[in-house]
Amino acid sequence: MSVIARPDTPTVLQGAYACDVAPDADGGAFGAWAGSDWAEEALFGLRTSHPGGHWQFAPGHSERDFMARLGAGRFRVYAGTLAGDEFNPVQLTESPTAIQDPAVATFADQRLVTWGERLDQRFVVRAWTGAEAETVAPAPASLTRPTAAIDSDGQPWVAWQAFNGDTCVVVVSRRRRDGWTPPVVASDAGQSAWRPALRASVGQGVWLAWDAWTGHHFHVFARHIAADGTLGPVTQVSDVPLLAMDADLAVDADDTAWLAWEQSPPWGDDHRFNMTRQLVLAAVDPGGRTYWAQSPWTHGQAPIAIESFTYSLSPENIVPVSPRLIAGPDGVELFFQRFRSSHQKDFGWRLERIVYAGSSWSDPETVSPFEGMPDTRYGVAPLPDSRRLLAHNATKYIPMHTRQRMNAGLPRLRAGSAPVDRERIEILTVEPPPKADEPPLKVGFARYEGDRRPTPQARRDGRTITVGDQTYRLLWGDMHRHSHLSKCMSPNDGTPLQHFRWAVDHNRMDWWALTEHLEYLSYNEWRRVEETVAAFTSDGRFEPLFGFEWGNNPGHTNIFYRDQQLGEELRALTLMSPSLEDLMERWDARMPAGEVLAARHFQGHRQPDVFEGYRARWEPSMEIIQTRGDQRDWIETFLREGAKIGFLGASDHARHWHFAYCMTGVWATEPTREAIFDAIWQRRTVAASAKILLHTEVSGIPMGAEGKVSGDPQLRVVAESAQPLREIEVYRNGTLAHRESLDTPTLDWTWTDRGNPRSRNYYYVRVVAQPALPQSTPALAYASPIWVRAPEH
């Protein structure tokens, strides 16, 4: 294949992370991109794991240089002509916060760019139509990644995904002469809708596609919208009971809407968001009839083989993601990204194309010599000379070792992960596919006739308990999750947005924490994760936490902060610290007490003297269970030395080792980030592998607290589980003091510790529930300890 790339990346494209393109009336292509001017790579000579444990400054640079630049970074959106020799971009906006991926549309000599931006602490949809940037609408709630179209009447349209704290909706607005129309919800009522795609109809109006959680699966939907905004009927395009997500849309000369989407098995069994995945191609005609593409596989699947390799303990899969479409007379071109190598652990995704023409598919082919990351928008556009212009995120990443290389005795590549280097947008042109003899065949849509057994539909918890005069609500979240941006295990951890799909819809959580490995994140990646957390914050309804994981000396630690304003300084202090002890000394001098917390887990923290670095001022809780298993013995290392720590449950990476996933329940006074933070600090936490209500008290002293009793300590346990509780265990000072078999979904149980000679004790409880599925691991939950002073016997 002939690929033409620019010999040098223009300065204005350096530091950019997302882009889109469309053909323009001048015979070229018009594009827009978002990026930042934060070029911190020059400050550091080494940005990776090494014995010193932190990033190393380059000669001539020091901590003072790094700290002096805090707050100086700016994000911008540019637009301009991208084909030919002309390159005169216009700056459309500037912001101190990361900007959501811009989208582009053109018609005749009209141009439209839209993006999501935070103005005055509000998320808004912005648009540019050739003059000044303007606000389309303050989002009805938080928003993600708008999409754009200009219809045949020259009317600009914008669609975006809004979040109201409970579900997501797809919203549209169009620009009339007097301004943008009020936003209209265009997704179906009763669904939680994600990731819209918008394209102009050949006739009048636009086509809109999205995917939505239907209670058991994600499915892809489409509808036509008339030029006056009248919503046409909704067509469900996907039908197989799997997860159909992240659709793209292209319209052919017959006004048939072609859709491609990612499709994966249901989540939950192993909690891996991107373990196996296929791309599916289908179509909807103007009459609402649906069709599959003819496929040698099944149900319109593009014949793209899945490759497997092993990095550490379990197989990883190389799967196609991020579809983009061009529908033309020579077939439907399906562009996609795929993990670049099975020979080493690395984090570059290559850009490929497969073509559906007539009734056959071409072989997949690589269309760019550059690799990038798959979580930001890229653009493809047909040029008048039939070539295609591509613009996509590109990075440099040094690969790591894999088990295959180790077993083969090959030289080691690199000891640890690192951030990507040279983030930029690359622009190139590729040849069109061979001319087709006939148009793409549309196969009549045969509805799926197989097993449709639904998965159990999760619900928000909402249960309460009253202790004294205070009522607490049980709020569930996961304090330790990674997307592929962490670059520390596999490419199958999924995108940040897929994590919020799981938390908001699939598992109906109340809060969430994406704890990407900070030392492996570029500045742009870290800021984009922060803005995703902010975008999904809905006070009182869904409250993700700001945080990250730090994997250096003496071991892996998750760090959380209440206020996003602390984030940039906290990041700098962390990256400059050679150890956790050094980092906490920096916090003593610069961070307000109670606003930052550290939560260790057993990965690495297993040295004989590990307790010596424990700091109660910053460490209220630690992980006792993970998907890797029950780590009670490890956490006793701290409890027996006198540490007063609460218990956390977390999944970590998306793989099924022992539990499918784990989570933390907090007993909070209200459903806000402040109250969740307070509950963790005060150790009102439950570590669990299922949503098991669990609360304990000892003679009136509530879970997580300490106090004095006048007689024999009496433990009260309240528990409730969807599956029958099978066992309860009481631990005193780290030793099993009592075990009892159960067979009940609810429990209000007491036990008196008689004749214990010690006057100072800590107690905690573990309950075990019957597994939800046969042959799966029993569910369990730990209640945080209670510290008790009792009379001596």
Image (cartoon, helix red, strand yellow):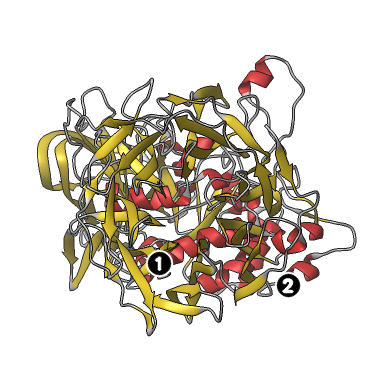
> What residue would you read off at disc 2?
69
Of residues 387 and 112, the one nearer the viewer is: 387
Left or right: residue 687 compared with residue 609: left
Residue 318 seen in the figure: yes
Residue 314 seen in the figure: no
Question: Percent position (x, y) of residue 469?
Answer: 18, 73
Q: Earlier in the sequence, mark 1 or mark 2?
A: 2
* The residue positioned farthest toward the bottom in the image shown: 178
Q: Are marks 1 and 2 in contact (CB under 8 Å)?
A: no
Left or right: residue 347 compared with residue 205: right
Question: Percent position (x, y) of residue 700?
Answer: 21, 62
Left or right: residue 247 compared with residue 236: right
Can you tell which quarter of the image residue 633 is in?
top left
Vertically, is 21 above or below 403? Answer: below
Mark linked to residue 766: none
The residue shown at (68%, 50%) is 426
Of residues 109 and 631, the one nearer the viewer is: 109
- In this rendering, which labeled residue sits more in front, label 1 or label 2? 1
Can you tell which quarter of the image residue 465 is in?
bottom left
Of residues 167 and 558, the one nearer the viewer is: 167
Question: Percent position (x, y) of residue 509?
Answer: 30, 54
* The residue positioned farthest toward the front in the image shown: 437
> What residue would you read off at disc 1?
158
The residue shown at (80%, 52%) is 8
Q: Residues within 10 Å of mark 1 (few under 14, many from 20)?
A: many
Q: Residues within 10 Å of mark 2 (few under 14, many from 20)?
A: few
Q: Amino acid at mark 1?
A: Val
* C-alpha span from label 1 to label 2: 36 Å
The quarter of the image holding the N terminus is top right
Q: Amino acid at mark 2?
A: Arg
